[in-house]
Amino acid sequence: MEDIIRLNNICYSYYGRIHAVSDISLAVKKGERFAIIGTNGSGKSTLLQIMNGLIHQTSGTYHFKDLEVTENTLKNKGFLRFFRENIGYVFQDSDVQLFCPTVLDELIYGPLQLELNEGVALDRAFEVMKMLQIETLKDRPSYMLSGGEKKKVAIGSILTMNPDILLLDEPTNGLDPRTQCFLVELMLNLSDAGKTLVIATHDLSLVDELHARVALLSEEHKIEKIGDCDEILKDLDLLLKVNLIHEHIHFHGNIHHRHILSHNLSHKHEKD
Amino acid sequence: MKNNVPAFLLSRPSYEPRNFDKGRLKTSFIEKGIHHAAQIIQTGYVNWETASKDDFFQGIDARVKVIFLLFYIIIVSLKNDLISEVLIGVFVFILSIVASLNIFSFYKRVIFFSFIFGFLAAAPSALNIITKGHIILPLFHLSSAHHLWIYQIPQEIGLTKEGIYGVSMLTLRCMNSLSISLFVLNTTTFPDIIKALKAMLVTDAFLMVITLSYKYIFIFAKIVEDMHLAKKSRLVGQMSAVDGRRWAAGRIAFMFKKTTLRCEEIMKAMLSRGFSDNIKIYGARKLCLKDWTSGAILLLIGMIFLYI
């Protein structure tokens, strides 16, 4: 499979002072599920924003489908259109992403930007609402939605643009288990439909469920390892090293246990 | 969930690069405004970093620095000659170097604001229409003098020596007051300033308002920046000025709504943690020898400025 996204030695620092990502090189293949995992502040969101051309690397190169993406190339209207219709970005905070008066306006905003006619845009919006089970919300303003509904609308607002690559920043964060389950299934369905998914998360069970290829970021904002889901999630020493899991004490009745807390891969009890 | 992905999502956008010769995007006025709003965070961060350095002036207790600020601003206002004002300016410049401030960005701000609030505001008073005196630079020559309401417009209009002196004094006072204030703000972290003001018996309500305002300026600047990025990620071409204004108006309404809700939540959080109209601030440390010595030196230099 060809590389769609290719980052080479990417560095980025906020205000020229706070290092967010350092010397990152990775490639995302067409149609794959790719997860960027790491602790809070390791640079996952920054990396997604660089991939979406919202912020620009201080050094290194970013190629999208063999075309270099820079602040300058994104000023070209033709390239910008090509780039935006291929990559959609779902923000961690849905509140910042939803800015249209109602849910329906939110869903047709993207297609209208792509200069699709209103009929097609509305068809897309209704199909997506049906898929996400949010038809009843179509006339509601975004501030009258629950957290899960906002997340669905935020994802829908990107899906109506039909991008080939979806960048999802902590997609299941703060959602109830039912909505989380719904989103995981949705992501798997979209992946089956041929979409490339790039997910930034620290939720290891999500990575396991999606069975994604993984790039593990260290607390030094560097790539610690890139590999298959099983290879990385089973390497508890590696996960301990980057502080994604920790030792944890709990009780079963009167028995006191100490074990490594990870998602569901390890629950090895040792009697203290 | 059943796999009910709509048919249009199964069709893929063409990967063939389109014709990229469609002209270039211009940065809109609103976008520039948002970038400037986002710079608040950067400025705040840079100030905090400078104020947290381990240099001599940063290490002095905030109470000493706040008293220094008030005392020197009074001196600047009392002095009536250019030489003293220039000397005070040089003194603050030396202090800025000692405190390892970024002199260029520091004086850029000082000069910008002094130019607007000092020089521009006072510039007309240099003319002999307002300040009578000896003309040293004639500008216009009218056929005859005019009398207009309470103003006497002389035949010859120009800059007077007394007027220029007055404008220079006002500009220098403005510049000195600003540089002293910014100097203290750049060498003292915000929490330390609040502690110092609290120690000086400034009203709790006032301190609470400025503390919360300062914090939420940063939070909302970050939200504005994120909202801008979210819009940018879905924007394929250029937003028209009308759409841009509409977006900004919608977002302002959203921010207002969010602020109102947040305000209620914060109040509840404060109450639940025992807030009762009185801020209890931890850690007014004892003044050490360094604080007393530097305070005494600053006081002595201030007295010298007063008497020269």
Image: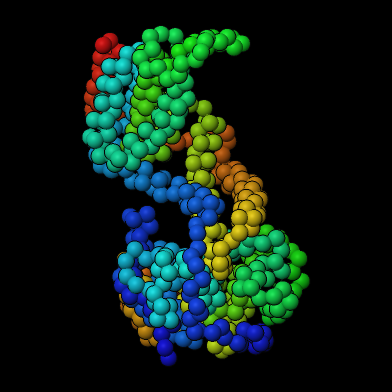
- Of B299 and B15, which appears nearest the observer? B15
Eyeballing the image, is B237 above or below B280? below
Judging depth in this view, the residue of B140 and A122 nearest the camera is: B140
Q: How is the image coloured?
A: rainbow
| Residue placed most toward the observer, A69 or B164 | B164
| B217 is higher (above) or lower (below) than B291 | below
For the image shown, how many numbered marks are present on the structure? 0
Could one spot residue A267 in this view of the protein? no
Q: Nearer the viewer, residue B86 or B182?
A: B86
Residue A150 is situated, as x and y percent measured from the top left of the image, at 64, 66
Question: Can the viewer see residue B308?
Answer: yes
Relative image position of residue A111 (x, y in whole percent) = 64, 73
**Residue sitting at the far bottom:** A1
Q: Quadrant of the C terminus of chain B?
A: top left
Q: Where residue B94 appears, x then y in whole percent?
A: 23, 30
Residue lying at 33% horizontally and 75% vertically, measured from the top left: A8
User: Left or right: A249 with respect to A206?
Assistant: left
B67 on left or right of A157 = left
- In percent of the image, x 47 and y 25: which residue is there? B121
- State the quadrant of the N terminus of chain B: bottom right
Task: Write the residue at 61% across / 76% down.
Answer: A161
Q: Look at the picture and state if A207 lies above or below B206.
A: below
x then y, percent, for residue B62:
35, 32
The residue that appears at 49% across and 15% down in the rendered structure is B142
